[in-house]
Image (spheres, rainbow, N blue to C red):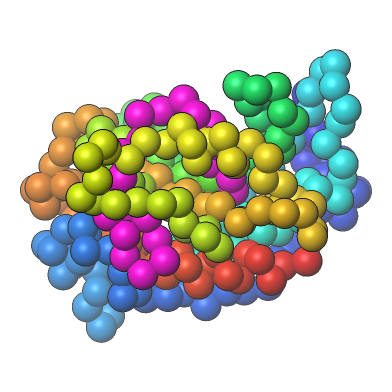
Amino acid sequence: MKIPFLKLALLGLLAVAPAVPAAHAAAGDSRAPKKLMERWVAEAPGPGAGLPGWYSKAPDVHVHQPRNLAKIPVAEIDLLRRRAMVAFDALMQQPSLRDVRGTSLHADINISVVPTLDGVRLVGATFTIRAKSVIEGNTDTIQRDGRFLTPSEEGAVLSVFLNPYDMMARRQVQAEGVERKSLQVRTGSAFGLYVADTLPDYDPDAEYAWGPRPLALQLQHDRSWYQPGAAGVHPLLVHLSSYSHENDDLRSDRLNPERPAARLAAAMFMTDWEEVQRRMREVR
């Protein structure tokens, strides 16, 4: 069951979160494509070509309450929402997403009970930005708030998981390396980054490849994002995915830097996720 927007407002869950300074050109991911970053790390990069794209002023919040189990408490919903807003604020200040052209950006926060393989009750929140091409002259292109979007386009998705249990338990997540306090991961060609108070053991020279299942078994008991004081490591996963050929082109630095997926990738690579995770922890 979804809690409607009006009810959230009445419950006081739509207060604006404190603004978070963006971390431009974070000393970050060595995997970041060179040409892509050259386009967006300039002193004052232009917004690009195309129609002004519509973008969310704030994420739409969707709370999926279980039908036959205990409801997610309002306090937990509010804390998860406010913590997810830290990621929204940081990303939307990045040059590739600011005053965006030729691309629309729709942000959502989904909060739900996550079924685990061992039957442990876990509440998760996923913040997403879906980026779609705005096609000038297309009959499906519409105007909203003085800007434009083409709803029929598929688009790319940047997801921020506050506890990525489901990804680690059910997807083929591979480790690529460790930089600072972040574990670089991938699903196929899609980029991902895992940040937590304590990273899982990873040895690139180990006889057997790193697997996500042991981490998933730990994360199913981690309530640190929504129950203050609960044991846990505040696990955060950032994941970018588009069409398979765009994921491949992004990795090989062949993707046009102004494509929706490329804009999301630039924002992902230019955000200091360790700082974002720290600021999320500070939200009470």
Would residue 182 be counted in the magenta stretch?
yes
Say which residue appears at 50% left-offset and 41% top-offset.
215
Furthest-front residue in view?
Answer: 207
Percent of width and height locating residue 36: 18, 60
In this view of the protein, can residue 243 be seen by the observer?
yes
Say which residue appears at 59% left-offset and 41% top-offset.
219
**In front of the other: 33 or 8:** 33
In this view of the protein, can residue 128 be seen by the observer?
no
Q: What stretch of residues is rendered in magenta?
A: 162-184
Percent of width and height locating residue 15: 78, 61
**In front of the other: 71 or 97:** 71
Furthest-top residue in view?
Answer: 68
Say which residue appears at 56% left-offset and 52% top-offset.
235
Percent of width and height locating residue 144: 52, 46
> Left or right: where does residue 114 sit relative to residue 67?
left
**In front of the other: 62 or 259:** 62
Q: Which quarter of the image is occupied by the C terminus?
A: bottom right
Quarter of the image where one finds residue 85: bottom right
Quarter of the image where one finds residue 8: top right
Would residue 41 be counted in the magenta stretch?
no
Q: Is residue 146 above or below residue 217?
A: below
Q: How many marks?
A: 0
> Left or right: where does residue 237 sit relative to residue 43?
right
Furthest-right residue in view?
Answer: 10
Q: Which quarter of the image is occupied by the N terminus?
A: top right
